[in-house]
Image (tube, helix red, strand yellow):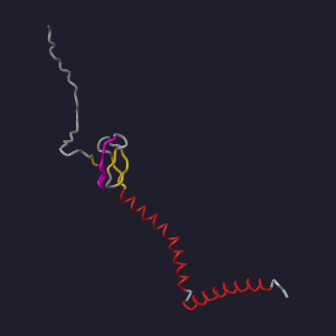
Amino acid sequence: MNQNFYKLSQINSSSIGCGLLFILICLLLGSVGLGWVVNGFFIFLFLLFITPPLLLLGARWWIRRKLVEDQCPVCDYRFTGFDGVEIQCPSCGESLNVTQSGFQRITPPGTIDVEAVNVEVVEVSTPQLED
């Protein structure tokens, strides 16, 4: 007899099991309905292509709402900063607090802010002591 017949029947019986399992899964999905699979695929594609532009628009809206452009109250250098953040002026190094209305100096409590209008230097002669 043919000795390869036994090996051939083993290969066929294993492929029959895989084929039967595939057919049973197809019958199960067919009885439940395949509409949910198709709908899930379209929802996935919708989310895949629509979510990134929506995230980009949301980020642009948030940044525009938070960015404040103003002049430094000390040196009048114009720059931008985020609302609610403490920053330093890139020109003069003054510590500033950013609000929606603009930049405000951060001064320690009890400090009186004085602006010099006109400063004149006056030479005063001092008497010298002679020995």
Q: How many marks?
A: 0
* Relative vertical location of residue 128 with respect to residue 111 in this rendering, above or below: above
**Percent position (x, y) of residue 45?**
54, 74
Query: Where residue 27 sits in the image (x, y, percent)?
Result: 60, 90
Looking at the rendering, the stretch of residues picked out in magenta corresponds to 93-103
User: Magenta span has 97?
Assistant: yes
- Which residue is located at x 37 percent, y 50 percent? 80
Q: Quadrant of residue 26?
A: bottom right
- The vertical placement of 107 against 60, above or below, is above
Q: Quadrant of the C terminus?
A: top left
Q: Quadrant of residue 22?
A: bottom right
Position of residue 11 measured from the top left corner of the image (x, y, whole percent): 74, 83
In this view, the residue in front, 33 or 92, is: 33
Name the one closer to the observer, 58 or 121: 58
User: Taking 94 as reference, is 119 above or below it?
Assistant: above
Furthest toward the right, the residue is: 1
Quadrant of image for the N terminus: bottom right
Classify residue 116 by image quadrant: top left
Q: Residue 112 magenta-drawn? A: no
Task: Give the residue at the far top of this rendering.
Answer: 131
Going by the image, does 8 lie left or right of 71?
right
Q: Nearer the viewer, residue 25 or 104?
A: 25
Q: Residue at x 18, y 20 (%)?
A: 124
Work out which residue is located at the far bottom of the displayed protein and give it. Answer: 31
Image position, residue 106 (x, y; %): 26, 46
What is the magenta segment's predominant secondary structure? strand
Image point (53%, 84%), residue name: 36
Depth check, front residue: 90 or 40? 40
Answer with left or right where residue 70 lies relative to residue 34: left
**In the image, what residue occupies the spot 29% across and 44% down?**
73
